[in-house]
Image (tube, rainbow, N blue to C red):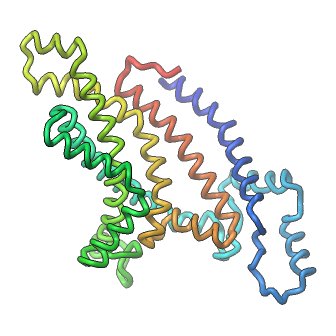
Amino acid sequence: MWKTIVRRIFIMIPQIILLSILVFLMAKAMPGDALTGLLDPSVDPKALEEQRERLGLNNPWYVQYWDWISHAAVGDFGQSFRFKMPVTDLIGQRIANTFWLALATLVFTYLIAIPLGIISGRYNDTWSDRLITGYTYLGFAAPLFIFALVMVWIFGFHFGWFPTGGSVAPGLTPGTFEYVISKIHHLLLPALSMALISTVSTVQYLRSEIIDIKHKEFVLTARAKGASESRIYNRHILRNSLLPIAAFFGYEITGLIGGTIFIESIFSYPGMGQLFLNSISLRDFSVVTALVLLYGIATIVGSLLSDIILGLVDPRIRIK
């Protein structure tokens, strides 16, 4: 297992390098540059050109890329032109909110999906299965941003049960009990909104696996030997059905991080997703490239994490 992990890490290095080149080239292909619209239109164009020359924006793309990646390798993603602060510090202010939002969504997803998947798979073709399957169909059909807007309108504006923006109530002292409760209160609605949509694929995976495995020969043999239904489901069916869920765990994490881009924008939640969209509209390329690179690295690491978890859950599986 350790040899496999080390080998996969070495394979990740060229993937990350290629990803960084693509991210940089796509950012350079966007219209304008970091100074577009930044200064007063009445400023002398020669002064703008001098500023571009000083910042190296007129250099060939490979020179600009080397300057960027060599600094990024040591954690320096440059300066945000719009926020007037280092990109690393700017992301550091937002990454905790995105992390807790993704973690809460992941917990809610599995708390909802695993019981529903077990019930739907174990009692397939019953009314409970039809209700759960209907819910998954609605979840697949409903776009995340539309569902989130509905959740904001119903539980935020109509009933007023949850706040509709921010990550904590203003005026609270960090570290106090009231501060923690306020953070959780602001976190619940966006996390539940994303979890209720993210759940449907996990429910379908688990349901299909349970239905398929409960007709396998080793399950029929266990029944013929007189094993109880609870033992059959706990020891044979459920254990084998959770393998694909474990395999998708890493991808689920990275998918949730990407999904927070829409959720944070709709709920005005100050995380990396909201920062990403704002930076695109403001042409803050240093922030955009840093965030896209981080999201890409998280996806690559998530793939490795899924393989590791799958190997731990079932030692018979050997990753090639």
Q: In which quarter of the image is residue 88?
A: bottom right
Which residue appears farthest toward the bottom when viewing the image?
42
Residue 80 image position (x, y, % from top left): 68, 70
Residue at image coords 52%, 67%: 274
Side of 252 where 104 appears, left or right:
left
Question: Where 312 falls versus 73 (above or below)?
Answer: above
Which is nearer the eye, 273 or 78?
Answer: 273
Image position of 129 (left or right of 104): left
Looking at the image, residue 34 sits to the left or right of residue 251; the answer is: right
- Figure disc tally: 0
> Residue drawn at (40%, 29%), measured in percent from left and top?
310
Residue 281, x across and y down, in percent = 64, 71
Horizontal relation, residue 50 to residue 270: left or right: right
- In the picture shown, does residue 66 fall above or below 182? above
- Quarter of the figure with residue 117: top left
Q: Which is more toward the observer, 122 or 142?
A: 142
* Residue at 23% in and 12% down: 217
Foreground pick, 250 / 70 = 250
Expressed as whole percent of the image width and height from the top left, the position of residue 196 reads 31, 54
Closer-to-camera residue (128/46) = 128
- Check the image and report above or below for 21 versus 28: above
Residue drawn 46% across the image and 41% down it: 251
Q: Which residue lies furthest to the right in this view?
A: 46
Please identify the quarter of the rendering in which residue 29 is found: bottom right
